[in-house]
Amino acid sequence: MEKGIIDRFEGDLAVVEFNDTMEDIPKAKLPKEAGIGDVLIFDGDKIIIDTKKKAKLKQEIEDLMDELFDD
């Protein structure tokens, strides 16, 4: 089982970051609701969105932004 994050879309492809590498994956293979920033779990032929991990990453980013711009 692997995890990756959707970095961006380029035409019919999703550019997904796996640790330090990027891989193009056809959008047709992803869940319809998948969007930029979604954390994906690749389990064999099945791809699902890890909503808990996305929420955690979003909170971490917000916390870092608060620290950066805190007066």
Image (spheres, rainbow, N blue to C red):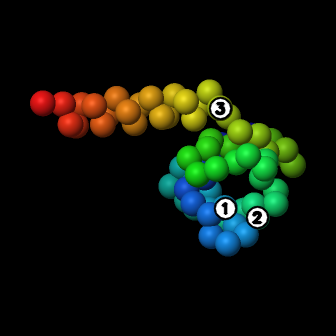
Task: Say which residue appears at 49% left-offset and 34% top-offset.
Answer: 57
Q: Residue at x 82, y 56 (%)?
A: 29
Q: Are marks 3 and 2 in contact (CB under 8 Å)?
A: no
The quadrant of the rendering that contains the N terminus is top right
The total number of labels drawn is: 3
Mark 1 or mark 2: which comes first in sequence?
1
Binning the other alpha carbons within 10 Å of mark 1 as few (below 14), some (14 to 19) or many (20 upward) gives: many
The residue closer to the viewer here, 67 or 47, is 67
The image shows residue 34 at horizontal and vertical percentages of: 70, 48
Q: Give the amino acid at mark 1.
A: Ala
- Residue identified by numbered label 3: 51
Residue with the mark numbered 2: 26
Q: Secondary structure at mark 2?
A: strand
- Image x and y of residue 16, in percent: 62, 56
- Measured in 3D between alpha carbons, the distance from the residue under mark 1 to the one under mark 3, in whole angstroms, is 18 Å
Please indicate, yes or no, whether residue 41 appears anywhere in the rendered image: no
If you read the primary sequence from the N terminus, does the residue marked by circle 3 or circle 2 appear first? 2
Mark 3 to mark 2 CA distance (whole Å) = 21 Å
Residue 66's disc is none
**Residue 43, percent across and down?**
80, 41
Check contact, mark 1 vs mark 2: CB within 8 A.
yes
For the point 12% across and 30% down, the residue is 71
In the displayed structure image, the side of residue 40 where residue 69 appears, left or right: left
In the displayed orientation, state which residue is furthest to the left. Answer: 71
As drawn, the residue found furthest toward the right would be: 45
Which residue is under mark 1? Answer: 14
Query: Callout 3, which amino acid?
Result: Thr
Instruction: Give the residue type at disc 2.
Output: Pro
Q: Examine the rendered structure and indicate whether residue 16 appears above or below residue 54.
A: below
